[in-house]
Image (tube, rainbow, N blue to C red):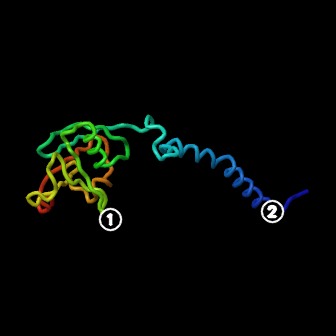
Amino acid sequence: MMMNKKFIWPTLLAIAIFTVLVFGLPTLTDRDRQQSPQQNDVGSTASNADIKTQNVSITVQGILEDRQVAFKDGQTALQALQNLNDNDPSIQLSVKEFSGLGTLVESLGGISNGTDGKYWHYKVNGALPMVGADQYKLLPDDKLEWYFITPDEAK
């Protein structure tokens, strides 16, 4: 009994798709779960041990020079500064959320934005990023520098 070729190929294709969906999709989903942090019921990371910690160098003009600070993969320049602030009370970090702009540094070391027309700006590896510090993702061994300067000096 010979089957029609027009019937065999669609049937084989349907069986192959079914097999991939039943056996392959759960495997892919499990792999993705292993590569990204799990969230528990309250939204915190289930296992911080799986997240690799790196170092970044932070300088804050007039306050500290070239301090090595730990940060986790995917953290931003602002989060690294917050990590430093958590461990060093002399930083006295103050931030403010602005709708549409993000979170901006308001003061460091008791020096507030607007004093003498100056504001806190940051550079990474000597370059001024085109995004806010709350959006700039750090890489291992980046050099993060905070300057208290006028907007014209930042250019």
Q: Do the residues labelled 2 and 1 touch (CB within 8 Å)?
A: no
Q: Name the N-terminal-most of marks 2 and 1.
A: 2
Residue 61 pos. (x, y %): 13, 46
Residue 43 pos. (x, y %): 47, 47
Q: Residue at x 80, y 62 (%)?
A: 7
49 vs 138, left or right, is right
134 vs 25, left or right, is left
From the viewer's perspective, is the residue at label 2 or at label 1 nearer? 1
Q: Which residue is drawn at 50% across and 43% down?
A: 38
Q: Does residue 99 sit above or below 49 in this rendering?
A: below
Residue 82 pos. (x, y %): 28, 44
Residue 1 pos. (x, y %): 91, 56
Q: Which residue lies furthest to the right in this view?
A: 1
Number of other residues with Cα within 10 Å of mark 1, as a class: few under 14, some 14 to 19, many 20 or more? few
Q: Report which residue position mark 2 lands on.
A: 7
Q: Residue 30: give its label.
A: none
Total numbered labels placed on residues in the image: 2
Amino acid residing under circle 2:
Phe
Mark 2 → mark 1, Cα distance in angstroms:
58 Å
Amino acid residing under circle 1:
Gly
Q: Nearer the viewer, residue 112 or 138?
A: 112
Q: Report which residue position mark 1 lands on.
A: 100
Label 1, secondary structure: give it: loop
Q: Which of 59 and 115 is in front in this view?
A: 115
Number of other residues with Cα within 10 Å of mark 2, as a class: few under 14, some 14 to 19, many 20 or more? few
Q: Which residue is drawn at 67% across and 50% down?
A: 20
**The C terminus - image quarter:** bottom left
Choose top left, top right, bottom left or bottom right for residue 67. Answer: top left
Q: Nearer the viewer, residue 102 or 154?
A: 102
Label 2, secondary structure: give it: helix
Choose top left, top right, bottom left or bottom right for residue 114. Answer: bottom left
